[in-house]
Image (cartoon, rainbow, N blue to C red):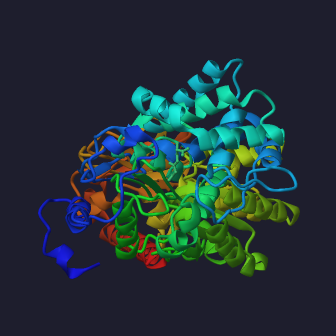
Amino acid sequence: MSDEFFSELKSASPIQDYLQYLHDKFKSINDGEVASYIPELATADPNWFGISIVTMDGHLYEVGDTRIPFTIQSISKPFVYGLALEDHGRTDVLNKIGVEPSGEAFNSISLRPETGQPFNPMINAGAIAATGLVEGHTPDLQFQRILDLFHHYTGHPVEVDERVYQSESSTGHRNRAIAYMLRNFDIIQDDPSPILENYFKQCSISVTGNDLAVIAGTLANAGINPLNGRRAIRSEYVENVLSIMGTCGMYDYAGEWIYRVGMPAKSGVAGGIVAVLPGQLGIGIYSPPLDPKGNSVRGIQTCHQLSMDFNLHMFNVPHSTQSVIRTSYWGSELGSDRVRPLEERLYLKKSASKILVYELQGDLNFSTAEIVVRKINESFKSFEFLVINLKRILHIDESACKLFLSLYLRMKGMNKTLIFSESSQHRLLQRIFKANMNDSFPTKLFIDSHAAALEVCENTLLLGHSGQYGGIREQVLAKHEFLADLSPDEMSIVEAMMKPQSFEKDQEIVAAGSIADEIFLLTSGTVTVCISLPDGRLNRLASFSAGVTFGELAMGGANKRSASVYADTEVECFTLSLEDLDQLEKDHPAIQCKLLRNVLRLTTNRLESANRSIGALL
Ligand code: DON
């Protein structure tokens, strides 16, 4: 971008400043002539010049004459062509109108000699034919559908500039000749006059430069108006409209336009230009003076500079600033947040390497999903469980969903388990899987919590190992690490201090902030540790299986509970009061020393596990 731009920064928005820079740079261009072959068009002020840009989330940037009404003229053509496609489908429309650039002027009286078919829908012949394809029982009803179409594209009702319409209808002899040529070749099969009048009216629809940006932005946004989220054209036809704009939209300047600017575009003899950067921007420019090819002189210069300065050429594919694979790791490197008894941890330390996790980010389309699937296939023999975390995925398109479906079907055939975690917002993925599996996909294919998805894999491994999980056979107290190294007599002394307790499913066992005056030894069921977020939601930190001790930091002097603990299931446990544990120091100091050493070991293990988790994510 030229340095002079940066010297002109005036507002908080660099985009707004840049548009002002463009406007200042090109407003003094005096080349070109205001169209006069339609007499009413000659009333336009040659100094009018407005630039408008709309983003995909509906933000409008504008500078200059962006709200002055003028007639849309040929800019209407690709959009009416899209309506004809919706009414008749590609095949029938292709039988009437070609899609080849003609390299000729917009008003050339040129049809394919053998069939009379217009070369494309952007030259007047093809556009008149397209207008004739718009469905409706009467010409008025057909035209009302065209008005409705531009209502959807602009986001507001539109109307015909009657003065321009009358001016064009009374002087449009060349177009009348073209219409009768089309009748002659049966491209138009009825009286061409009503169709021609509808074409003149469609060209006389009144718009502004801002409207053009919204219209372009709607195409850039896959057919959905970025201002109001309403669909203006079925997404399947957007690519056809854009490709016609890309190859034929600027008539015999189309080649140089795509070469220098690189965006599907359409110009109009009143001085409008729309340019579309798919998925990114809609651009609308209005300035009446035209070059000999019928395109706005300032509009062409502005689009060329904009494309050059911001590398907007559609073939200048932005490098993905980040890999779609955020991180990948094995379950033995980073497991669920379930705190498990030693015996389970030791087993999973070996076996959890059968769990492979991919955390993805950004957009999943064919090329990015292909990378993911290819990487997964490189480890295909090494895993039994695959968890794909979609938390940071912004969008998954249909091709990516189909690639994942093919991966799932291959895995299913080899008894491997696929789970998508944090996937609740990706409805298309779930729909495509359901549609291809007669609604019978496994309940655990989509699990919203990533930790829960990992737990499912771990518990399945433990089930396969011991026939049970959530404590390999309900841990008896002797296996609690908190009680490690106690002799049978010492164990008896400690057991005598314990109180049995039980809790119902979902019951709160410990409340955050409450006094930490007892330790819990879980003997059956599972519990979850949570903290309350500022907005009142509970955030899960970890879950504990039977055989695990919790609340032991009370022995280290933690006098308030730092988190709440809830029963996930019916829970049985024993508690040891801090008072009794303190009494041990007098009565049985050796026992207390062992218990404190065990608490230190427990805390160290959990810290090491947390460090491993952090390491696996770096
Ligand atoms: O049919 C015509 O001649 C006009 N209504 C539209 C021509 C036009 O906008 C050509 N585009 N640059």
Question: Where, by quadrant of the figure, is residue 357 drawn?
Answer: bottom right
Taking the spot 77% from the left edge, 36% from the top edge, the residue there is 188
Q: Give the camera-side residue of 280 and 359.
A: 280
Is residue 531 found left or right of 181 in the rendered image?
left
Which x, y percent locates residue 482?
A: 44, 65
Q: Is residue 285 above or below residue 128?
A: below
Which x, y percent locates residue 206?
A: 41, 34
Q: Is residue 141 above or below residue 76?
A: above
Is residue 29 found left or right of 448 in the rendered image?
left
Q: Is residue 58 above or below residue 299?
A: above
Is residue 463 found left or right of 24 in the rendered image?
right
Number of marks: 0
Q: Give the camera-side residue of 275 and 530.
A: 275
Q: Is residue 162 above or below residue 22?
A: above
Is residue 52 found left or right of 282 in the rendered image?
left
Which part of the image, by quadrant, shows the C terminus? Answer: bottom left
Which x, y percent locates residue 164?
A: 43, 33
Question: Where, by quadrant of the figure, is residue 470 drawn?
Answer: bottom right
Taking the spot 70% from the left edge, 74% from the top edge, the residue there is 376
Taking the spot 42% from the left edge, 74% from the top edge, the residue there is 311
Q: Is residue 13 visible?
A: yes
Q: Is residue 156 visible?
A: no
Q: Give the camera-side residue of 49 and 108.
A: 108
Which x, y percent locates residue 555?
A: 28, 61
Which part of the image, by quadrant, shows the N terminus? Answer: bottom left
